[in-house]
Amino acid sequence: MSITPLYTHEYFMKEAMKEALQSFKEDEIPVGAVVVANNRIIARAHNLTERLNDVTAHAEMQAITAAANSIGGKYLVECTLYVTLEPCVMCAGALAWSQISQIVYGASDSKKGFTLLGKPVLHPKTEVISGVLQEEAEKILKDFFAQKRK
């Protein structure tokens, strides 16, 4: 019998998915994020671009600010961002400046994701893991846009 650790990438991505669901309920593009330090969530966020009338109010940007406030500093070294959608170039730039140690995302963004640049945008020490709960992350986005087209 094997014991599954409580704090896995899937566990924290499910927490980010809860934030994405909140975005969906608020008629925002459903992207959610959490920042984790020492196996503890220090920040939760979701898209607020519509509510704040601010194109920069992406889940990642909100999470970076909340995490920095939580730890009392601007650098998120030894922190992991879990986000349901691959960060855009703007968010990747902010994550680079934050020196975040790890980014874990669910769905890829074939239109605006930072990996489309084909060159490093993130801090050189940042590790990236993609595809965690990818199907679930893609489904909430597809459902949202299908509802918008009705």
Image: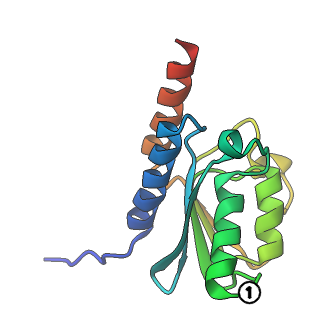
As drawn, the residue found furthest toward the left would be 1
Q: Vertically, is 129 above or below 144? A: below
Q: Position of residue 144 (x, y in %)?
A: 52, 29
Q: How is the image coloured?
A: rainbow
Q: Position of residue 127 (x, y in %)?
A: 66, 72
Residue depicted at x 52% and y 20%:
146
Q: Position of residue 54 (x, y in %)?
A: 78, 45
Q: Is residue 1 left or right of residue 107?
A: left
Residue 147 visible here: yes
Q: Position of residue 129 (x, y in %)?
A: 59, 63
Q: Quadrant of the N terminus?
A: bottom left
Q: Is residue 32 left or right of residue 114?
A: left
Where does label 1 land, which residue? 73
As drawn, the residue found furthest toward the front would be 52
Residue depicted at x 81% and y 65%:
94
Q: Vertically, is 38 above or below 148? A: below
Q: Nearer the viewer, residue 54 or 15?
A: 54
What is the quadrant of residue 116 in the picture?
top right
Residue depicted at x 70% and y 37%:
110
What amino acid is labelled 1 in the image?
Gly
Q: Nearer the viewer, residue 57 or 2?
A: 57
As drawn, the residue found furthest toward the top would be 150
Residue depicted at x 21% and y 78%:
3
Q: Secondary structure at mark 1?
A: loop
Residue 78 visible here: no
Q: Vertically, is 68 above or below 110? A: below
Q: Nearer the viewer, residue 118 or 70?
A: 70
Q: Nearer the viewer, residue 68 or 40?
A: 68
Mark 1 is surrounded, within 10 Å at the Cα level, by few (under 14), some (14 to 19) or many (20 or more) other residues, namely few
